[in-house]
């Protein structure tokens, strides 16, 4: 009876998913004439797999990353289960409708993992499984019932390099409870995959300790193989080139018959096997690959009773069950109106009942009873939360000279010494740069995570070392190899722990700042899922002078400004960093509404992730500061280090480690000009976001809206000039003059750096004190200002 229900559900999902796409492209009124799209063929190949998985194989604690192009099937599942309205389905790929690709933040149905950038959702499941192990190993994580982290994978997704990077990391950490189900339809956007790819796939997964389950033949094919002549038919199927199999599928039963008779006809057993079937039956037999057979897939899932990582290689036909099945152009193709009309008749869906859930169902009551008992859906939505952790007092070290990177390490070390609940929930990670990004003291105290205890041989042999690396289940640091994509995928998975597993983590990852760009796709993906984490890019800029241009970041401040869901800071001083980190630990836990703070017009109550751009250059620290303007300004994005007076002609605005040069330049200028202002910018990102938000609000009628940077600049005389300076791209701060209409010159770095001393490079790029003074003199003399070029 279960197989009968699964077949009924499969056919309902096939119809509803394809009708949804057809409706969006051919029926819903269009305003721009552009194809809406929807990937009918890529959805069809996964219908049987998803039916077997969701309605037979899954448990409530399991989580699924759906192949991006199978989103119509996922939404059809949610519609069938009553979790999605018809209105949303009718507005597929429309404004406020169901999304093109499953989205945790944009869709209203129960999406476990966002997908869209192919390969990332696949790898994400591995890191979610590792995070699950991490939580389960902790005393505060007891009671967590481990689920399987499952990815539905398009075979073309296996071209993505991050998939293989994560395989290696999973092997290192003893990955378990992970399934990847490969939709092996052998067709991608541009053509047919190479022959024999499955052998390579199997070899790679086996090498990394995965079990591989090849699901090639459906029940019809397996039954035919038992008939006289069946062995020869099986051999022909195994030897048939991918392209020929696809073409024959598209052309149909009569062509199948001719091809098979030409190749196998023997006037005996094989001929009889073929001739016993009508054209329609023969086509159904040849298209009954394992991945397109719902009962076969259900059997394959039910046969797994262990927690080893498992790859199901499920053979499918792209566009299975539709008129465009097998055609090499079907990836983005759509059924025409005549094709859909004929297919609707074939599917038995009456006109006017296209959206009816139970159309074509003989016994709706029996099916509804079956659906109500499906384990995966029985507990309802599986989006959890955890309480907000109190942030302990965080203070800066009292050293006279210190770098922000070193101050970051000391702050974490102080937290590690304490027993706060927040410290217990911090998990750190780094792509092979743990020691050089100041995480060492934290790791020495809090240890590295492993499900099994492993001692440090250097410690056992009493060999002196600054790194005391012991692996323990209670450890709080994930050791990663040097792959930044893995860093951001792990941060994303850990940053969703409260939602996935009901236990909050505060993930912190460190990375060399220029290599943020190497993991940028995964960073964007993590933010799109609304994961909460702190990433520390350090060391940054040409201030890392002796390392040369390859290790000197230029555009990373602009990355931070442009990335949604990420509040970016570049503090210059340790006390700024302490204030920002205390705020960040709270901000990472927020989940409020989107109403903006009318002081800054930032939507801080929504919370988000945080990016800190730090430096290795120790600079002289200011005297202790506890005033509200400083502390609030450090969080809001800027404060006056030296307020401009009424006769001010020049304001120097700086961000980050270049503070010492800006302050020195202000001192030199102040000897001959009065009331020089110095604006300490800690976050160009938050200043700019507040400014643009305030402009939008004013355009909508709230004319008195005033953001933080406008408040700061309100008393700067109109004749004043602004010089901005940053060890990074000058565009980061170049917009400041537009806030209240001041002439501005932006200094920074626009070209690859080079080796040298810090002084050499600052002079080379004109961002040293003398360079700043020269620009100020040029501004106030009325002469053209010459820019420095590399």
Image (spheres, grey):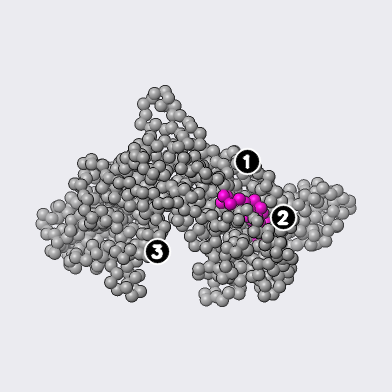
Q: Position of residue 721 (x, y in %)?
A: 20, 63
Residues at marks 3 and 2, CA–CA distance in whole angstroms: 45 Å
* The stretch drawn in magenta includes residue 48: yes
Badge 3 element: loop
Within 10 angstroms of label 2, few (less than 14), some, or many (20 or more) residues?
A: few
Which quarter of the picture shows residue 27?
Answer: bottom right
Residue under pointer 3:
594
Mark 3 and mark 2 residues within 8 Å of each other at the beta carbon: no
In this rendered view, identify the residue nearer to me: 195 or 6.
Answer: 6
Residue under pointer 1:
306
Within 10 angstroms of label 1, few (less than 14), some, or many (20 or more) residues?
A: few
Residues at marks 1 and 2, CA–CA distance in whole angstroms: 23 Å
Specify the segment rendered in magenta. Answer: 44-63
Mark 1 and mark 2 residues within 8 Å of each other at the beta carbon: no
Residue under pointer 2:
2
In this rendered view, identify the residue nearer to me: 262 or 575.
Answer: 575
């Amino acid at each position: 009876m279960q197989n009968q229900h699964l077949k009924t559900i499969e056919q309902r999902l096939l119809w509803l998913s394809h009708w949804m796409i057809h409706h969006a492209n051919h029926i819903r009124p269009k305003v721009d004439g552009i194809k809406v799209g929807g990937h009918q063929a890529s959805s069809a190949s996964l219908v049987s797999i998803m039916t077997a998985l969701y309605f037979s194989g899954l448990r409530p604690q399991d989580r699924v990353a759906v192949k991006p192009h199978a989103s119509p099937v996922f939404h059809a599942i949610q519609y069938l289960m009553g979790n999605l309205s018809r209105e949303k389905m009718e507005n597929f790929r429309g404004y406020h409708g169901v999304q093109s690709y499953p989205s945790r933040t944009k869709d209203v149905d129960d999406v476990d993992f966002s997908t869209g950038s192919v390969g990332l959702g696949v790898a994400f499941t591995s890191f979610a499984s590792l995070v699950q192990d991490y939580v389960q190993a902790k005393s505060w994580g007891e009671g967590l019932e481990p689920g399987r982290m499952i990815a539905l994978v398009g075979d073309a997704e296996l071209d993505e390099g991050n998939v293989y990077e994560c395989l290696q990391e999973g092997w290192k950490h003893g990955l378990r409870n992970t399934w990847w189900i490969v939709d092996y339809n052998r067709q991608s956007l541009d053509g047919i995959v190479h022959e024999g790819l499955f052998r390579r796939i199997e070899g790679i997964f086996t090498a990394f300790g995965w079990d591989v389950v090849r699901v090639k033949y459906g029940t019809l094919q397996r039954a035919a193989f038992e008939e006289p002549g069946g062995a020869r038919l099986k051999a022909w199927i195994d030897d048939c080139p991918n392209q020929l199999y696809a073409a024959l599928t598209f052309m149909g039963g009569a062509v199948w018959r001719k091809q098979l008779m030409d190749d196998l006809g023997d006037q005996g057993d094989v001929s009889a096997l073929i001739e016993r079937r009508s054209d329609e039956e023969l086509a159904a037999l040849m298209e009954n690959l394992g991945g397109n057979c719902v009962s076969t897939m259900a059997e394959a899932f039910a046969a797994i009773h262990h927690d080893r990582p498992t790859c199901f290689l499920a053979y499918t036909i792209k566009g299975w069950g539709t008129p465009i099945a097998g055609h090499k152009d079907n990836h983005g193709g759509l059924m025409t109106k005549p094709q859909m009309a004929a297919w609707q008749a074939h599917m038995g869906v009456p006109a006017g009942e296209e959206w009816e859930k139970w159309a074509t169902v003989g016994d709706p009551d029996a099916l509804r009873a079956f659906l109500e008992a499906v384990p995966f859906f029985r507990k309802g939505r599986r989006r959890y939360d955890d309480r907000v952790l109190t942030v302990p007092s965080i203070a800066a070290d009292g050293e006279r000279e210190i770098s922000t990177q070193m101050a970051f390490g000391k702050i974490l070390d102080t937290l590690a010494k304490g027993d706060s609940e927040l410290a217990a929930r911090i998990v750190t990670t780094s792509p092979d740069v743990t020691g050089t990004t100041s995480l060492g003291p934290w790791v020495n105290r809090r240890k590295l995570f492993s499900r099994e205890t492993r001692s440090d041989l250097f410690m056992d042999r009493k060999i002196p070392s600054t790194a005391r690396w012991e692996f323990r289940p209670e450890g709080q640091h994930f050791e990663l190899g040097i792959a930044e994509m893995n860093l951001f995928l792990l941060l994303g998975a850990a940053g969703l722990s409260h939602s996935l597993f009901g236990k909050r983590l505060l993930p912190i990852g460190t990375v060399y700042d220029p290599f943020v760009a190497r993991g940028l796709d995964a960073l964007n993906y993590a933010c799109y899922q609304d994961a909460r984490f702190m990433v520390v890019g350090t060391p940054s800029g040409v201030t890392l002078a002796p390392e040369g241009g390859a290790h000197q970041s230029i555009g990373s401040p602009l990355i931070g400004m442009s990335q949604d869901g990420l509040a970016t800071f570049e503090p210059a001083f340790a006390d700024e960093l302490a204030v920002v980190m205390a705020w960040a630990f709270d901000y990472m836990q927020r989940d409020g509404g989107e109403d903006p703070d009318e002081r800054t017009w930032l939507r801080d109550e929504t919370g988000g992730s945080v990016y800190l751009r730090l430096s290795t250059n120790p600079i002289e620290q200011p005297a202790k500061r506890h005033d509200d303007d400083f502390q609030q300004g450090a969080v809001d994005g800027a404060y006056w280090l030296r307020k401009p007076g009424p006769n001010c002609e020049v304001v120097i605005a700086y961000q980050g480690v270049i503070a010492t040069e800006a302050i020195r330049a202000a001192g030199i200028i102040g000897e001959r000009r009065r009331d020089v202002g110095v604006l300490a910018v800690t976050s160009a990102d938050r200043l700019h976001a507040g400014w643009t938000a305030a402009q939008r609000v004013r355009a909508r009628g709230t004319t008195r809206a005033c953001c933080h940077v406008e408040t700061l600049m309100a008393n700067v005389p109109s004749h004043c000039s602004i010089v901005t300076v940053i060890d990074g791209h000058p565009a980061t701060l170049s917009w400041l003059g537009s806030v209240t209409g001041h002439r501005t010159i932006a200094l920074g770095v626009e070209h690859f750096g080079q080796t040298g001393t810090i002084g050499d490079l600052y002079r080379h790029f004109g961002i040293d004190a003398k360079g700043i003074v020269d620009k100020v003199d040029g501004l106030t003399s009325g002469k053209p200002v010459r820019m420095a070029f590399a």
